Amino acid sequence: MSVEAGAASALVRRVRLPNDRRTPAAARALVRSVLEEAGQDALLNEALLLTTELSTNAVVHANTELDIEVAADHEGLTVTVTDFAPGPVEQLAIGPRNESVDIGEVAERGRGLLLVDHFASRWGTVHEGTGKGVWFRLESRTGGATVVATVPTGASPEADLPSVGALSTLLEVRPESSSEEGLADFALEMLSRLARLTGAAGGVVRLDRGDGTGRQIMARHGRAPRDDAATIRVGLAVQRPYAGELELDASPDGYGRPLAEIVAERLSLHVDNDRLRRADLRRQTWLTFLAEASELLAQSLDVNLTMALIPQLVVPRLGRWCAVHTTDAWGRLQLAAATHADEAAVAQLHATLAESGPDSVLARLEEASRLGTQVMFGAPADGFAVPLVARGQRLGTLAVGRHHRHRHDADEVAVVEDVARRAALAIDNARIHDERRKVARTLQASLLPPALPHVDGVGFAAEYVPTGSEVGGDFYDVVPTAAGDGWVVVVGDVSGKGVQAATVTGLVRDVIRILVDDGKPMSEILCRVNRTLVQRGGGRYCTLAMASVSKEKDGTLSVCLHLAGHDRAVLVRADGKTSFVGEGGTALGLLETISSPDELVTLGPGDSLIFYTDGVTERRRGRELFGTARLREAAAPLAGYPADVMAARLRSTTINYSVEEPRDDIAILVLRNDA
């Protein structure tokens, strides 16, 4: 703050105040202190009223900092309020002092200048650099000058203005809080003070928030105004969808209407603030809702589950009912999912959606899908539909029915359209995932034998559990030998997943089949497969468990087992005893030369040999793995069962070990002596 000394009897103070709701109070405190120091207390009420009006208008309309200069001398007081917003000072057409002014014709933002014109001895505008503002002069009555005020049309010349102190008290009222209750209390206080100033028998403030409930009483004082000429009605200057009015049981003549207009303007400002606050809260709520909806939709990669989830997200928050239709291969709409806030009305909703005809809901939905635009439909459904479009492809429609007492506003329509975009993308992603899964299953099936051979006295059985939408590198096979007196059992795992891993898997499987058919020995087969992978495997390697099986005359099975970096097989004797068999060798595709020690295993009647991939032993439950020990324990009780039962039980035990989806493919092959 700075103090400038003018004449010996003059006192000048100037201060810059922030753009803050407390600024009018600070401006009043400055004016009060200058008047007290200058001994001009008689001008206090008028000065505080006009200072409040000008500083409030600067904060509300200019929305900038403001400079206030207060100069007092023995003749009176001069106050200048300057803001820094671009544009001219709000103009007010005020006639000469000897002419009356129709206050009802004053523009909304001119009422502050109207008060200045009524109570100030002189006033005007200033334009200096980037600032512009209004000044007024109040002259002391003791100096012989009087405050001049024009008389509004219709008022008697003898009519007195309301006391300046009372007007100042009226304009200083502020809401205690921004809540709905705080705004209602503020409106009631303003209405009560207005009624006391004008002598009105009662008044009411009505507000319509545009939510379908119509105009509600926001505040009421005394008796409700009568619907006759002796009633003042002033509309609230609020933005859509809000609308409202102030009614006062007082004569429109005199100062009742201009005071009611001032109060209505104050109410409008705070009601509009309430509208903005509510709109901000609603937008925050909708953003949270859309984020949660996106998260839920992204979690589902199943087409049917995704479409069933969409209506559950919409109802009842965005509508009374919701239906999702998808297009078939011929572009026709088919109902995929629908729900209603009232479960008893679901059957009727399905019947309404199934009706055909030019004016039916289905016809409107087909129009929305065909044109790719929003369409409305009336009773009995009463709602609207938006197309489901993802990646330029029209997938169907999303239809939403409005609530009984509430029509969708612009924000809700925008949210429904946003939900439709996210839902369409989720449906399309689920369809793409489903297609990829089908391709992976088809490709995986081509890498596995369609059926295992049926041999008297020898049991072969296998189980395979694929994971995800990518084809894995696990495979198994049983190949008859060239001589026709034995079989070669193969269980392998190629590193990685995807098309490249599947290519290498097919390569290994085909090379093994060709070499077995040529009668090559096991060691040579492994060496040639290793050489092929080194040359053509693209950096991928393969672990392999391969065994040649032949029937002996005494009813036993002779098994020569080779392990190329693969887990050892589980030997299950007929009496339930279990052990691991096989000697470790070198994985194929890593080195130019490999070692492949063999182990001879004899299977008596009822004995079994279990081959598996690491998808079994690495099945995870939290940080704990299924492991080889659990596999051995699970295999022991299965000694007396056929090969297919053993394989199925082991598969079930492995899957049920954890609630998580398998992270790796699971392959199990059981060889059993059924003699």
Image: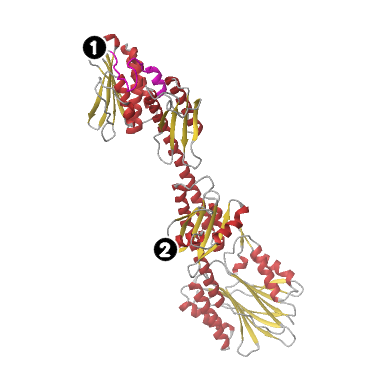
Q: Tell me: 259 left or right of 222.
A: left
Name above or below for residue 44 compared with residue 439.
Answer: above
Q: Tell me: 345 left or right of 171.
A: right
Viewer-closest of 294 and 97:
97
Label 1 residue SS: loop
Q: Amino acid at mark 2?
A: Gly
- Residue 163, located in which quarter of the rendered image? top left
Task: Report, in whole angstroms, how far the alpha carbon at label 2 lies from the one at label 1.
Answer: 81 Å
Kindly tell me whether residue 486 is visible in this rendering.
yes
The stretch in magenta equals 146-171
Query: Which dot marks residue 8?
Result: 1
Q: Residue furthest front?
A: 228
- Residue 22, located in which quarter of the rendered image? top left
Disc 2 crowd rating (10 Å Cα; few below 14, some 14-19, many 20+) is few
* Residue 264, image x, y percentages: 41, 30
Give the mark nearer the N terminus: 2 vs 1. 1
Q: Are marks 2 and 1 in contact (CB under 8 Å)?
A: no
Viewer-closest of 477 and 490:
477
Question: At 46% from the left edge and 50% from the top edge, which residue is drawn?
Answer: 413
Q: Amino acid at mark 1?
A: Ala
Disc 1 crowd rating (10 Å Cα; few below 14, some 14-19, many 20+) is few
The majority secondary structure of the magenta stretch comes to loop
Viewer-closest of 33 and 496:
33
- Residue 68, located in which quarter of the rendered image? top left
Magenta span contains residue 158: yes
Quickly name the residue at label 2: 392
Quadrant position of the C terminus in the picture: bottom right
